[in-house]
Image (spheres, rainbow, N blue to C red):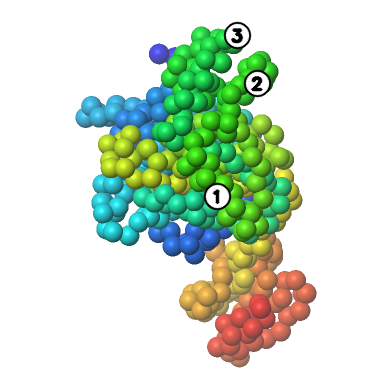
Amino acid sequence: MTVTAVSTFQAPKGTYDLLPPDSATFLAVREAIAAPVRRAGYGYVETPGFEHVELFSRGVGESTDIVTKEMYAFTTKGGTDLALRPEGTASVLRAALQANLHRAGNLPVKLWYSGSYYRYENPQAGRYRHFSQVGAEAIGAEDPALDAELIILAADAYRSLGLTGFRLLLNSLGDKECRPAYRAALQEFLRGLDLDDDTRKRIEINPLRVLDDKRESVQRQLTGAPLIVDHLCEACKEYHERVRELLTAAGVAYEDDPRLVRGLDYYTRTTFEFVHDALGSQSAVGGGGRYDGLSEMIGGPSLPSVGWALGVDRTVLALKAEGVELPLPAATDVYAVPLGDQARRTLFALVTELRRAGVAADFAFGGKGIKNAMKSADRSGARFAVVAGDRDLAEGVVQLKDLVSGEQGPVALSEVADTVKERLV
Ligand code: AMP
């Protein structure tokens, strides 16, 4: 076994820490993605960070990179084969089936989630081994309006963040009626190409994924490959047309991308991806589609479903690339600077009172002198400093200093909360 020396303070390769102040943007992005789905009746679901490995090998697909190369799979001391979750859909569907949510009689079951996902990828800008997604799944209904709803919600989430540089790519992958014939036609075409052994194997297991190969040498040979759009059955064509009409009616622009297959095997019919052109090679900010067969693949009943997952990390990168600053609430509105022991007790109590009144307040901890304490007040980003010494307290007042204008004046201790609240709006 090779042992690589690592620094104790070094986060593992492909991971990064979220720290203030940037972490506030990250949280705001999660919130902004969740807000539209909450308004559309999706309930919050949280599943474990790891699952039985078969859930992903059966669900995501034995031939996908995610399962064959990127899964953090391990055997526990008790001999159970588990994997850190590489994606959310299979777990959410598993949880819904386990709890019999689909039998409660109110389909579709609409769920949203937010969490960490793990893939052993080659790290680069925008591609990490630990990343965050917010996702939404609508389980147990086949209705083009549901596909459209989810796509519209995702587009609205990006818009609400102020992003403008994203595009929506749309495709249909057909269903169990029309896909087999297309698959065979594609296999025949692909077998005639000059491809390496791994790709040849892929032709036999999941030929559609070869279309997704990013290598220039492969893409060049794919010109003229049969496309699913020319092989869709009437029902799939009709379904796809309805989805497109509903998107157009909602003012959501899309581009037809007949090559869009995505990296997971479970998709049927509608598939889509949101890309942002300022992000270089890792341009996908989110994606999803319909997965009518997944429930049966993992041993459940037939439950046609649709969902998406949006990448939080890349959405944050897209905001940076567009120069969008989110309007974040101040971490601290009021910073209290006590001068002397009596003032420490009084201002500490005042800080508690302010917080209880909904004002973000902080305190000069550690017995700093006034100079240092005022520096900390400035650094905290607070709009106001509350300064008080024995003489102020004897008069029942504190000095309220507006750190933006520099103005300062006495305010009765009992009126600080109201005064600050009035002046903050
Ligand atoms: P997928 O589950 O592969 O469809 O991914 C959905 C979204 O999650 C992508 O569009 C990305 O925004 C994000 N994502 C997937 N893999 C990674 C990764 N390794 N690092 C960062 N974000 C990722």
Q: Which residue is mark 2?
A: 224
Residue 311 vertical position relative to residue 65 in the rendered view, above or below: below
| Element carrying mark 2 | loop
> Which class describes the residues within 10 Å of circle 2: few (<14), some (14-19), or many (20+)?
few
* Residue assigned mark 1: 243
**Residue at horizontal 27%, vertical 58%?**
104
Residue 68, by quadrant, is: top left
Q: Can residue 162 be seen by looking at this rendering?
A: yes
Q: Which residue is mark 3?
A: 194
Name the amino acid type tagged 3: Asp
Looking at the image, do the residues carrying marks 2 and 1 touch, with CB atoms under 8 Å apart? no
Q: Can you say whether 405 is above or below 1 in the image?
A: below
Q: Position of residue 344 (x, y in %)?
A: 53, 74
Q: Secondary structure at mark 1?
A: helix
Q: Is residue 192 above or below residue 40?
A: above
Residue 33: x %, y % from top left = 55, 55
